[in-house]
Image (spheres, grey):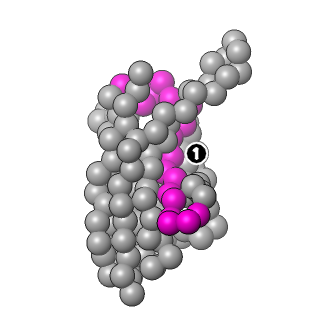
Amino acid sequence: QVQLMESGGGLVQAGGSLRLSCAASGNIGNMNGMGWYRQAPGKQRELVATITRGGSTNYADSVRGRFTISRDNAKNTIYLQMNSLRPEDTAVYYCNGYMIVVTTVVRYDYWGQGTQVTVSS
């Protein structure tokens, strides 16, 4: 069972920056991909950014050019550098990792507990 632990959230003014970290209890190289999702009050959880085992990245349109996802396999950690933060970025940010079993094509998702990011105007 993989455990994911986020850190780095907090309160920041609009235009500021934060860096989120997600430390995994196991080897993130075993994951097909990892990513960040967020959920604002009253809204559904949405994808923010993902990074595959091979290093390919994908971003939501709302954060592209402002956020950067990266990974450090040696530390079993992924990061989300968030710049030019806006009040609408306020949400609980969740770390995700997934594995796909090749023989059954079943996807297993792992989630962290989440970290609050609040951007004041």
- Quadrant for the C terminus in the image: bottom left
Residue at 63% across, 27% down? 107
Residue furthest front as drawn: 42
Identify which residue, 98 or 38, lies in the foreground. Answer: 38
Q: Is residue 85 left or right of residue 8?
A: right
Q: Position of residue 119 (x, y in %)?
A: 38, 76
Above or below residue 104? Residue 100 is: below
Instruction: Report the magenta residues as a range.
Output: 26-43
Quadrant housing residue 116: bottom left
Q: Position of residue 60 (x, y in %)?
A: 61, 62
Identify which residue, 99 or 74, lies in the foreground. Answer: 99
Q: Amino acid at mark 1?
A: Ser
Above or below residue 49? Residue 96 is: above
Quadrant housing residue 10: bottom left
The reply to whether residue 53 is visible in this rendering is no
Residue at 44% across, 46% down? 95
- Quadrant for the N terminus in the image: top left
Task: Say which residue label 1 marks.
Answer: 56
Above or below residue 67? Residue 69 is: above
Residue at 36% across, 82% down? 120
